[in-house]
Amino acid sequence: MSNNVLLSIRDLQVTFDVAKKKKFVAVDNISFDIYEGETFALVGESGSGKTTIGRAVVRINETSKGDIFYKGQRINGKLSREDDVKIIQQIQMIFQDPASSLNERATVDYIISEGLINFKNYANEEDRKHKVERALDEVGLLPEHMTRYPHEFSGGQRQRIGIARALIMEPRLVVADEPISALDVSIRAQVLNLLKKLQEEKGLTYLFIAHDLSVVRFISDRIAVIHKGTIVELAGTEELFKNPLHPYTRSLLSAVPMPDPIYERTKKLIVYTGKEHDYSIDKPSWVEISKGHFVWGNEPEIKKYSKEVL
Amino acid sequence: MNDDKFTFVKLDEMASEKIIAPQYSYWKSVFRKFFSSKVTIVMLVVAVIVVVFSMIQPLFSHYSPSNTPNINDFTLRFNSPSWKLPFGTDPVGNSLFDRVWAGTRNSLLIAFIATTITTVLGVAVGAFWGYSKKIDRFMIEIYNIIANVPFQLLIIIIMYVIGKGFWQLIFALSVTSWLGTAFFIRVQVMIIRDREHNLASRCLGTPTSRMITRNILPYLISVIVTLISRDIPSFISYEVFLSYLGIGLTQETPSLGRTIAEFNNFMTGYPYLFWLPVVVLAIVTVSLYVVGQSLADASDPRTHN
Amino acid sequence: MEKNVILSARDIVVQFRVRTRVLTAIRNVSLELYEGETLAIVGESGSGKSVLTKTFTGMLEENGKVASGKIIFENRDLLEIKNNREWESIRGAKIATVFQDPMTSLNPIRTIGSQITEVIIKHQKKNKNEAREIAIELMNRVGISDAAKRFDEYPFQYSGGMRQRIVIAIALACRPKILICDEPTTALDVTIQAQIIALIKDLQIEFGFTTVYITHDLGVVASVADKVAVMYGGQIVEYGTVEEIFYNSKHPYTWSLLSSLPQLGIKGEHLYSIPGTPPSLYNKVVGDAFAQRNPYAMKIDFEEEPPFFQVSETHFAKTWLLDPRAPKTEMPEEIRDLHDKISKKVAIGGEYHVK
């Protein structure tokens, strides 16, 4: 993990039109940086807004307030055709559901080449085929799979096709939106290992969106916890597990069942209701408590957290 | 059992990546599913026979309503069906058989041409309409106005304005139907537009035109075939209905509708004059509909094995 | 303390007709459920875990049948029940099931209250008012606040976690002897999952039923189970108490499952993963079904199906590795001292747990 900031998000807000004149605020006050070469995890439950942020980074979702900077350049909002082409290739996404993220009516060959074809990133037909074969090989599939259709593959294989599709573009930043949640448990490790291997080989940076804290702990360098559209805590992985400050983070950590019967028997569950905070007078803000450890809270809370940090 | 069996064996990891099943082909599966039903095959045969026959027979019979060589021979009028004249003769001594097939030919031609125009235009417009939010805002206003006018009324008015005739009828049918098809396609497109694989394609920078041809339209084949299978019998019925009212085809053009309309009065006196054209109409409509529905079903890959 | 056997399944074989082929989903499984205990059934998809429990309630799909075996419950063989009406006195009343997806388990066009009372009226012969009182009490018991008011609401007005609570209430309305939970929390958020698991545990203590928990999540297994059955390829391959399975497992498949736990992953190194995919049960399985993916496979695994070897009074494993002729094999390094390894991780985590 280097010190160069690859992606920088400041005060981001994303809203959706619900009905005429009514807007739903999906995420608000989002600020964080992602450094080159790291795996940055965004953890939250359903409805927390984590996928919304991921899609805003890939520019599928439009933003209503705030900025997203990639290598110092603002990428949300209108971009020139030239910039658009450049950014599309540099930031790619891996989708969650292998059952619906591939075009069922296209061969694997077309699916993987789609990005290449869009930007004519190959010299001739033979070059393109060669690139596709190499992409398949990198994810552990065979060249003969090129002529097959998605439904002929298993979930794990389909997810690997999705990975090949994104990585053939040679991106720098990959947004992985819950890439293993929909997979069978015994396949997850396979795909995780593949993602790590590819990161090492190509020097990729990951924005890893997930809800499974155990997986996130294994794969990520830093973790941001998001709850109902707001990031409540951000810290280095081990720091977060060692010193969780925000009550939501604590309830999330206590809720994860550990595969250790003796421990589970004595565990105490912490429940978060949202009523732990009183933001009527003192408004909350995003504060760095210790180096690299940020929390969302108002003055009294920040005081309390500062004391708890070892 | 000797102890030698208890020795370790090395794993072959890539073996499980191979796919053993034969190559899947979409169209092969479509046709396999299509031909798996005996009823469909029978209906297909019937439909083909009827269509081919109706196209060819009039070329040999040279039937025309104004061509009445036997009009003065009273013995040749109102003859019941016999071996020489399979459908008997009409009030002017012409073979009903020739008349019915000539009329069917026109009905089918009108239906096929109008359906082709409606479908091509409707799908092309509907695809872009459903895909682009900007076009949708604009088109939906137009649609809301036009859709409130009853179809039958519109077609009658148009026919009154442009007059009777073969191409006039085709024009009227197409003009009043394409928007409905476009709207239907628009709804289907909106349903699949935001599916993950389409988001993925947008993420890869795929332009709208290729999104429509590779990502959206292939999923609409089944829907489009359903529309066609509904339109063809429907247009045949419209021709019959309008000619019945006297505003479809001209007097010189053989028409099933006018035939049925004219012979309505003979239902009790010479029932064969009325019922034979009706039966032929029914066979044509039903067989085409069943074939169309089966094809629509077969085109949906969820029905493939 | 000797617990009573409440249900005994012997030599169950389940087959499905799929077009022209036959899929043998359950290949000779025997199992016993003890009163007041929780049994967790773990396995990948396709291992047969859901199919097995469906035989207890006569809910196999149209094209499935139990080809052979006995299920003894309350002194009768459940597999001798031929018509649906007889099953109805068992299903919901004596053996109830909670399914994974609370969205589809509830009828969207009927009120929540009516769905609970329907079951009570049918099986307990109470009138509408009595049933309503019982239902509201149940709703309170499963943690629905304002139960009397929410009684008349519809499923769409409930969140996913609340719907699952209602599904549990309906399942328990008739005080069944056995509650089968088929991945009840897989579709729910982890915080809701923890609450639902705690709820089921509490209710089990209060109502005294036996729970069967089907899951693929070993964390959930550690949290809920007294006994564990590990299934693979339509068979139970290892069975034991939860401590035996986690700390002293003997079957290579169980080893693989434990080895691939992310909690055991070491940052910077690769996570252990089981290569390949489960076998197709359309074909007759020769030998051990796990052989092709088994890093400890021996020649004999490809030729003959292993029998169950007994490890302790409660612990059995179906692997040739336990045969006296097999080379002495220890469980992999990664999963030894599991408790210590995981404790270390948790100990780093702050004071949100009680030691």
Image (cartoon, coloured by chain):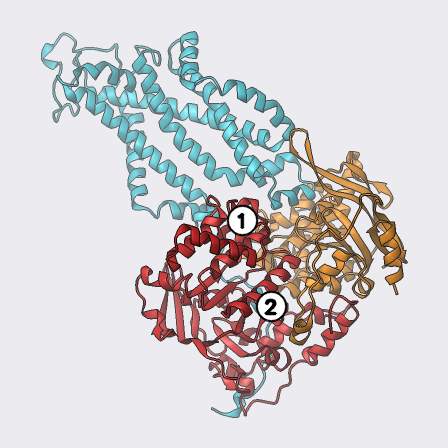
Image hue for chain B: cyan
Image hue for chain C: red
Image hue for chain A: orange
Image spot of residue A127 (x, y percent): 69, 50
Foreground residue among B211 and C128? C128
Q: Which residue is mark 2?
A: B14
Foreground residue among B224 and C208? C208
What residue is rendered at 52% in x and 41% in y? B219
Q: Amino acid at mark 1?
A: Ala
What residue is rendered at 40% in x and 45% in y? B31
Q: Which residue is mark 1?
A: C148
Residue A110 vs residue B292: left or right? Answer: right
* Gap in angstroms between the C-alphas marked 1 and 2: 59 Å
Q: Which mark is residue A268?
A: none
Q: Is residue C121 above or below residue C229?
A: above
Q: Crowdedness of circle 2 by 10 Å Cα count: few (<14), some, many (20+)?
A: few
Foreground residue among C26 and C344? C344
